[in-house]
Amino acid sequence: MKTILTVDDSSSVRQMVKITLTSAGYSVVEACDGRDGLDKAKANSVSLVFTDLNMPVMNGLEFIRSLRQLPAYRGVPIVFLTTESDDGMKQEAKAAGATGWITKPFKQEQLTAVAKKLLG
């Protein structure tokens, strides 16, 4: 079973992501901000990451940059789940190492489709 890390400061968003992905057959680890996400990523073997952009402690961009420095996470897909849809921000995210981008509010099928596509 593949494990997916969801990083978001909104517990309702984490809950929805978890319900959606566990019903699709994935195992989900939750983190409440980038720093927590980094700790959870180091403690678990994660195949895919969904992260929010705007979070306290460590935002999504800082989180991705830090995660990409870990050898185990150089090739792991990281997808932003955010209300931001600014093109400049998308470019910055790509430069930081993001694989993709889903704008909130998202459809559950969209999340599952992205997970299946990225995890094969």
Image (cartoon, helix red, strand yellow):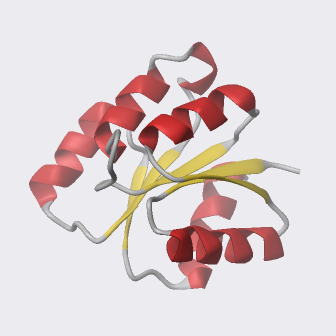
User: Taking 83 as reference, is 119 left or right?
Assistant: right
User: Which residue occupies the extreme left position in the image?
Assistant: 88
Q: Is residue 89 left or right of residue 7?
A: left
Residue 66's x, y, as percent?
41, 24
Residue drawn 14% across the image and 58% down it: 87
- At x 59% / y 35%, what residue is drawn? 76
Instruction: Please tell me which residue lies in front, 76 or 46.
Output: 46
**Which corner quadrant of the image does residue 73 belong to?**
top right
Q: Residue furthest front?
A: 57
Q: Is the residue 92 above or below the residue 73 in the image?
A: below
* Side (left or right) of 65 relative to 73: left
User: Closest to the observer: 76 or 54?
Assistant: 54
Asked if residue 2 is positioned above or below residue 19 in the image, the reply reads above
| In the depicted structure, whether residue 68 falls above or below residue 26 | above
Image x and y of residue 55, in percent: 33, 53
* Residue shown at 54% from the left, 77% from the top: 12
Count all numbered tags in the image, as a single digit: 0
Residue occupying the point 59% across, 31% down: 39
**With respect to residue 81, does 63 lie above or below?**
above
Q: Position of residue 17 (x, y in %)?
A: 61, 71
